Each structure stands twice: as structure tokens, then as C-alpha cells.
Image (cartoon, rainbow, N blue to C red):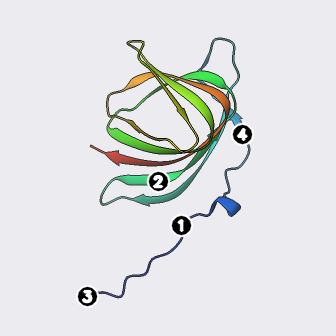
Amino acid sequence: MTNAQVKVLRSLENLSLGDLVLKPTAINGTEPKDAADNALTVNASSVDLGFWECSPGSFKTARQGVNEVILVLEGKGTLVSDAGERVDHKAGDMVLIPNGWSGVWEIHEHFKKQYVTIAV
């Protein structure tokens, strides 16, 4: 047995997300801005986790080669698939965005999430 240690990777009190920057995939005349803090990358298992925030607006997005699980920490948003399926989510919701999904993020209220992506 090893003497592995548990550690806190990030705390909500001291996140370092940096300045919000305009999303290059913004749509519908909106101006969403986002920032991220990648807390951990495990190259051997292709797992990334971190925090992300975004101001209100809409932008195109896709998940290629990864499944993403998010925990909404703050705000409200809607994921709209290319097929038109709408999934609303708010603070406290845990959401799976599966590999191969593509569509639009609609951020209704300043949004913060914790994410884990797992390569497939």
C-alpha cells in the first residue's frame, strides 16, 4: 500500500479564472465572454478537470473525443443541440454532454461550472 495523499485541487474561495475574453464562436449578435482554470490534467487517463465561467450570450460548441460532466455552480444556461433539443440547467444541476454532441450554449445568467472531461 502506498502513502498517497488527498489534496484540495481548487477551492471556490480562491479560483484563478483570469479575465473574461470574448468567445470567437459567439452567435446572434451576443457577446459572451469566458475564462477557465484547469485544475488537473491526468495524461495517462486522459482526464481533465477544472472550472469555467461565462457571461450571458450564445455560442457554438461541440464535444469531439470527450464526454464532459459539469456541475453548475452559478447561473442559468441552455444547451441546444443541432437537432433542436433544448436542455435547461441551473446552479446545482449535474449535466452530461456526451462525445459527439454539437450545438449552441445559451448563457442566460453569468455562469460558472466545474467540469470533468474524459477522453473516449
Q: Residue at x 52, y 32 (%)?
A: 89
Gap between marks 4 and 2 measured at Cα: 19 Å
Which amino acid, by three-letter code, is at mark 1?
A: Leu
Helix, strand or loop for disc 3: loop
Q: Earlier in the sequence, mark 3 or mark 1?
A: 3
| N-term mark: 4 or 1 | 1
* Residue 51 image point, x, y percent: 57, 50
Q: CA distance from mark 3 to mark 1?
A: 23 Å
For marks 4 and 1, give the CA distance: 22 Å
Q: Is residue 19 above or below residue 21?
A: below
In this rendered view, identify the residue nearer to me: 113 or 36. Answer: 113
- The residue carrying mark 2 is 49
- Which residue matches tag 4? 20
Front-most of residues 63 and 91: 91
The crowding category of the residue bearing disc 4, from other C-alpha atoms within 10 Å (few below 14, some 14 to 19, many at least 20), is some
Query: In which quadrant of the rendered view does residue 53 lie?
Result: top right
